[in-house]
Image: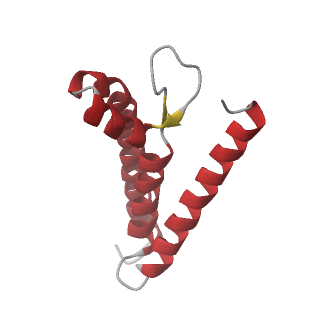
Amino acid sequence: MLSPESYHTAWLAYAAATFGAILVLYLWVGPRLSHGARLALGLILAALALTPAHPASDTQTWAPAIFVVFFELLTTGTEAAARPMRSLLIAQGMAFALCLVGWVLSRSLRRSADPAN
């Protein structure tokens, strides 16, 4: 069993590795995509990787929801995977909505800054 300190350390290491991987991906696709598209891709991938879920209904610890979903699908079936999948879909929806709001705001700011129209 993990102690609380090692549990927090494991989550910090997982989050740091995730952000490092997203930064490498951001820099790698740099010339291929615009700045906004790279930020949106990074936000959606961060939400996918960092969304927490309870591994079982009787546990108090958290695990990355993507791993819980795959583990539940492989071992128990789709009904057990529905609970962590719900939190994963909510996080993805929130990330997508944030990207959409950012896109709309950037478009409106660009139009208001253009004095020719």
Q: Residue furthest right?
A: 5
Q: In the rendered image of this protein, does residue 6 appear above or below residue 103?
A: above
How is colour applied across the structure in the image? secondary structure
Say whether residue 100 is left or right of residue 58: left
Give the number of marks. Answer: 0
Say whether residue 35 is left or right of residue 75: right
What residue is at 46 percent from the left and 64 percent from the top? Answer: 39
Image x and y of residue 63, in percent: 52, 36
Q: In the rendered image of this protein, does residue 22 appear above or below residue 52?
A: below
Q: Quadrant of residue 23?
A: bottom right
What residue is at 45 percent from the left and 47 percent from the top? Answer: 47
Q: Quadrant of residue 32?
A: bottom left
Image x and y of residue 42, in percent: 45, 61
What residue is at 50 percent from the left and 65 percent from the top? Answer: 22
Image x and y of residue 112, in percent: 44, 64
Q: In the rendered image of this protein, does residue 48 appear above or below residue 114?
A: above
Q: Residue furthest top?
A: 58
Image x and y of residue 6, in percent: 73, 40
Say whether residue 50 is left or right of residue 40: right
Give the quadrant of the N terminus: top right
Q: Nearer the viewer, residue 116 or 98?
A: 98
Q: Residue furthest left?
A: 78
What residue is at 32 percent from the left and 31 percent from the top? Answer: 72
Give the quadrant of the C terminus: bottom left
